[in-house]
Image (tube, coloured by chain):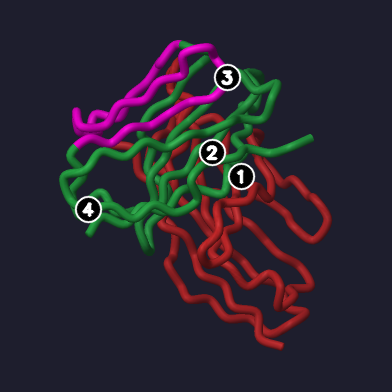
Chain colours: A green, B red
């Protein structure tokens, strides 16, 4: 049983560029979540999908951020016109809809915006 | 405003001692509570979850929940140097579609050999 995978693991980009991250959840999991974590803080929720439907999106999320999960399997998170403040670890988690909805995290993508 | 508060630490305990980590939350309707361990530079790793008042034990770990006091704790018995990490408390929302986790900022634990 493979866990959640994310690609790339590291991304360095220049301010103003667009970046896209991919997440592959645990195969039978139908819920997928994106979080962002900066140094010294806990992960902060960005958005979540149930199958292909995006059910929740943080009000703090800039409109430069967009996420998709077109076939209810893998998901992509795109950041347009990156800013230095976007530098963070981007974490993906997945869960199986049920009584506890326990979320398992992938290894994360570390983004550095120069 | 949903908030989860943890003592940031650092908390240092000698090897073999009991480490006690605490967490309070503001959303009284929260139903599920999770503890994650995070090593430096790595992603959070689930330790255990709890959703009923009382204690839940899993090996050397015991989670305690008191919904009336809005308080969750994690006890680590026989602490080992490999337990040195940041421990994150996470709370799942109370409304129907709110399945996202709200995290505290974590408590950094150091177990001294």
Can marks 4 and 1 be said to lie on one chain?
A: no
Q: Tell me where residue B73 appears, x and y as whole percent.
A: 59, 54
Give me the chain letter of mark 3: A
Taking depth in this image into account, of B74 and A62 the one nearest to the observer is A62
Give me the chain letter of mark 4: A
The label shown at residue A14 is 4
Q: In this rendering, which labeled residue sits more in front, label 3 or label 1?
A: 3
Q: In this rendering, which labeled residue sits more in front, label 3 or label 4?
A: 4
* Magenta residue check for B18: no
- The answer to whether mark 2 and mark 1 are in CB contact below 8 A is yes
Marks 2 and 3, Cα distance to the nearest angstrom? 36 Å
The label shown at residue A73 is 3
- The answer to whether mark 3 and mark 1 are in CB contact below 8 A is no
Q: Tell me where residue B3 appears, x and y as whole percent.
A: 35, 44
Marks 2 and 4, Cα distance to the nearest angstrom? 47 Å
Q: Circle 1 sits on which residue?
A: B65
Image point (38%, 63%), residue name: A40
Image point (72%, 88%), residue name: B113
Give me the chain letter of mark 1: B
The magenta stretch spans which residues? A53-80
Q: Circle 2 sits on which residue?
A: B67
Marks 2 and 1, Cα distance to the nearest angstrom? 6 Å
Query: Relative to B26, is B63 on the left or the right?
Result: right
Q: Secondary structure at mark 4?
A: loop
Q: Secondary structure at mark 2?
A: loop
Q: Residues within 10 Å of mark 2 (few under 14, many from 20)?
A: some
Does label 3 or label 4 sit earlier along the sequence? 4
Taking depth in this image into account, of B5 and A42 the one nearest to the observer is A42
- The answer to whether mark 2 and mark 4 are in CB contact below 8 A is no
Marks 4 and 1, Cα distance to the nearest angstrom? 45 Å
Quadrant hosting residue B110:
bottom right
Q: Tell me where residue A5 appears, x and y as whole percent.
A: 60, 39
């Amino acid at each position: 049983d493979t866990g959640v995978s994310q690609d790339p693991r590291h991304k360095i980009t220049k301010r103003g560029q667009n970046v896209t991250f991919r997440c592959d959840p645990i195969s039978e999991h139908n819920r997928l979540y994106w979080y962002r974590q900066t140094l010294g803080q806990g992960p902060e929720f960005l958005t979540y999908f149930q199958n292909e439907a995006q059910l929740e999106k943080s009000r703090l999320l800039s409109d430069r951020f967009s996420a998709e999960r077109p076939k209810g399997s893998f998901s992509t998170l795109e950041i347009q016109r990156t800013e230095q403040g976007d530098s963070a670890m981007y974490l993906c988690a997945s869960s199986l809809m049920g009584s506890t909805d326990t979320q398992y995290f992938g290894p994360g993508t570390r983004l550095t915006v120069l | 405003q949903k908030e989860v508060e943890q003592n940031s630490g650092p908390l240092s305990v000698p090897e073999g001692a009991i480490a006690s980590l605490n967490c309070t939350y503001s959303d009284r309707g929260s139903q599920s509570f999770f503890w994650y361990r995070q090593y430096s530079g790595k992603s959070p790793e689930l330790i255990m979850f709890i959703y009923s008042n009382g204690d839940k034990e899993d090996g050397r770990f015991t989670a305690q929940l008191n919904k009336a006091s809005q308080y969750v704790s994690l006890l680590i018995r026989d602490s080992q140097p490999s337990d040195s990490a940041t421990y994150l408390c996470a709370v799942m929302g109370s409304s129907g579609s709110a399945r996202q986790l709200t995290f505290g900022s974590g408590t950094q634990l150091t177990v001294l050999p």
